[in-house]
Amino acid sequence: MAAARRSKTEREAAANDGRRPLDRVYETIRQGILSGEFRAGEHLREEALAERAATSRTPVREALRKLESDGLVTIGENRRSYVSDFAPNEVQSVYEIRVRLESYAAELACANMTAAGLSQLTEINDRIVALGPEVSDYSLTQFMELNANFHLTLVRLAGSRQLEAALASAIMVPLILLKHYVWGDTVRIERSHLQHREIIDALRSGNRHWVSACVAAHIQSSRPQLAINTFIPD
């Protein structure tokens, strides 16, 4: 009974949090995926999600389509939605796309870089530094969010909508991979923020070749082991 009362209280709080139903559902599902509550391959039931977010099923469907474009959800032919799962060759492809396109986006960002852009990237990286070197469920979830934000911001600073659209889902996919594939390995938060710092230094220098090399090396160093061992010819 207490659990039922608590659940009702949570639903009422969600309904009155001031956000649009679509935004509320989107964030609810997204956080459930990133936290590992919703496992890879799990069926995301519209009715249960609507009840949880205190809304109708229409915003749930819209949120699921948005998450599909992010690469976090897969919608089947039967219109059922599942948390995305990735075979080793798909993981390899995602990282190849990122290495090639994101390093190019970084070159464009370097040519267009402003003090405000450098400040944005530095602020995000400082928040990663503040997490400390120890890895926990909380710090890993926070790191995933901040790391994706760093890379999405860098791509936006390239000033190319085409590149931003092409890379958006590829940058989001590793958020699942870190939970699903990499948790058994050591997630090196310290190494990541040091590499981010070198990327920022390269951007500040205006040397686009240095920037491109830093970004490519950074992405390669975060590649999961299963993607390292899977070969896709050029």
Image (cartoon, rainbow, N blue to C red):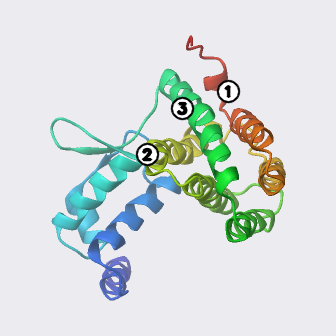
Please, what is the three-letter code of the amino acid marked with disc 1? Answer: Gln
Quadrant for the C terminus in the image = top right
Question: Relative to residue 200, is residue 181 depicted above or below?
Answer: above
- Tell me the number on the disc at residue 97: 3
Marks 3 and 2: which is nearer the front?
2
In percent of width and height, residue 133 lies at 83, 57
Residue 165 is situated, as x and y percent measured from the top left of the image, at 43, 47
Q: Secondary structure at mark 2?
A: helix
Residue occupied by mark 2:
162
Residue occupying image coordinates x 56% and y 43%: 174
Q: Quadrant of the N terminus?
A: bottom left
Residue depth check, mark 3 versus mark 1: number of the one nearer the observer? 3
Q: Amino acid at mark 2?
A: Gln
Q: CA distance from mark 2 to mark 1?
A: 30 Å
Q: Return the x and y of residue 116 as percentages of the image width and height.
A: 69, 71
Residue 225's disc number:
1
